[in-house]
Amino acid sequence: MLRQDIIDAIGKTPLVKLRLDAQAKGSVFAKLELLNPFGMKDRTAKTIILNAKQTGELKDDAPIIESSSGTMAAGVALVGTYLGHEVHIVTDPRIDDITFKKLEAMGCKVHVVNKMTSHGWQSARLEKLADLMKQFPNAFWPRQYENPYNPLAYRELADELIEAIESVDILVASVGSGGSLSGTASALKERNPNLKVVAVDCVGSAIFGQPDYPKRLQGGLGNSLVPLNVKHNIIDEVHWLNDEEAFAATLELARKEKIFAGNSSGSVYAVARWLSSQVSDQTKIVAIFPDRGDRYVHTIYNEEYRLQNNVNELRLPQSPQQVPYNTVVKNWSYSLLKGEAIREKSLHLR
């Protein structure tokens, strides 16, 4: 399929039915957002930047400044530099070498903070970003954590799902900024108000009431802050996996499904596979896989790294433990969300 330019190449990613295992009943379809030019956040960067140019918020000669240690950085670099803007990325030491080299190759200026502040690396990066905004007063900050065009970017993803399989019963997606899950779910609920929305987070992330642990090994999902784009009232259930479980699931995804991905995809895979054993054979589950494995060749896919960080036993339970919301968790667990998201009826569409 001919695309007019590299920005036009963002989106229309493949949807693949997974083969799963003997326990599976429902069907799981993996949306391979990792096959965007740099990853799922390419959609966010494209929508936010093009809208800002259209409205005049982003002037033709203005720089773009964003905080990211992963795929949002690459997406902003791709779209911003292609359109002729100077791009500054504020990141932290967790950035992997491959992403760093990609940013440099595209002509970005990369600023690495070297010390955590009150809310870990996230707040340290935002403080550095504020300094840069003072230095470049005409700069545009995409604000991925609160910009409404982040979730709006995923209406097209929802349209692609409906075009491919006509209906979705359960959506499973990881949560970092909240845009992809909240945006996709909101659009899908317009077609199916009974859609079940399952969020996947990591142990040590503060998004869903857990204590923040900034030294967690997982990247791409989780947060030390609670982004405004996380719409808690649209989410029915949240799962947390620890580092070892996420790594195990990611390696299993590559081995069994031949999808070389990052830990966000691996965790989503584990949750979606388990859900498929809890539902009827008519249930359609969509799992969003946001990240490629190339960022993790020196960590998840590196046995020496796993040994050094005590995650080499690669234990992944057969099923999660259900706990009351606000229970501090250490391994794969799930809760119903409080408030509007809690349902008395079963999630699992028997």
Image: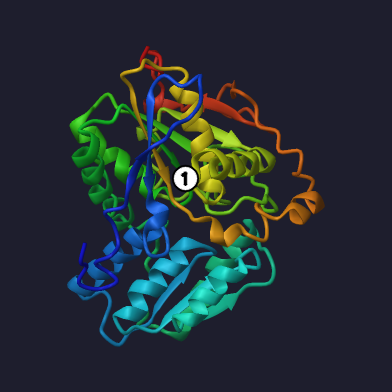
Q: Quadrant of the C terminus?
A: top left
Q: Position of residue 129 (x, y in %)?
A: 50, 73
Q: Quadrant of residue 305?
A: bottom right
Label 1 sits on what residue type?
Val
Does residue 208 sit above or below 150 in this rendering?
Answer: above
Q: Position of residue 290 (x, y in %)?
A: 44, 51
Q: Position of residue 255 (x, y in %)?
A: 57, 42
Mark 1 Cα within 10 Å, few/some/many (few <14, many 20+)?
many
Q: Nearer the viewer, residue 202 or 244?
A: 244
Q: Residue at x 54, y 69 (%)?
A: 99
Residue hosting label 1:
175
Does residue 90 sit above or below 30 in this rendering?
Answer: below
Tell me if I can see residue 238 in this picture: no
Q: Nearer the viewer, residue 125 or 322?
A: 322
Q: Name the side, left or right, on which 202 lies relative to 177.
A: right
Describe the element under mark 1 as helix, strand or loop: loop
Q: Name the side, left or right, on which 334 lies relative to 165.
A: right
Q: Name the side, left or right, on which 204 lies relative to 27.
A: right
Q: Which colour assignment does the render follow?
A: rainbow
Q: Quadrant of residue 72?
A: bottom left
Q: Nearer the viewer, residue 343 or 44?
A: 44
Q: Residue at x 23, y 30 (%)?
A: 167
Q: Quadrant of residue 66?
A: bottom left
Does residue 49 sit above or below 336 in this rendering?
Answer: below
Tell me if I can see residue 324 in this picture: yes
Q: Residue at x 31, y 52 (%)?
A: 13
Q: Position of residue 179 (x, y in %)?
A: 37, 50
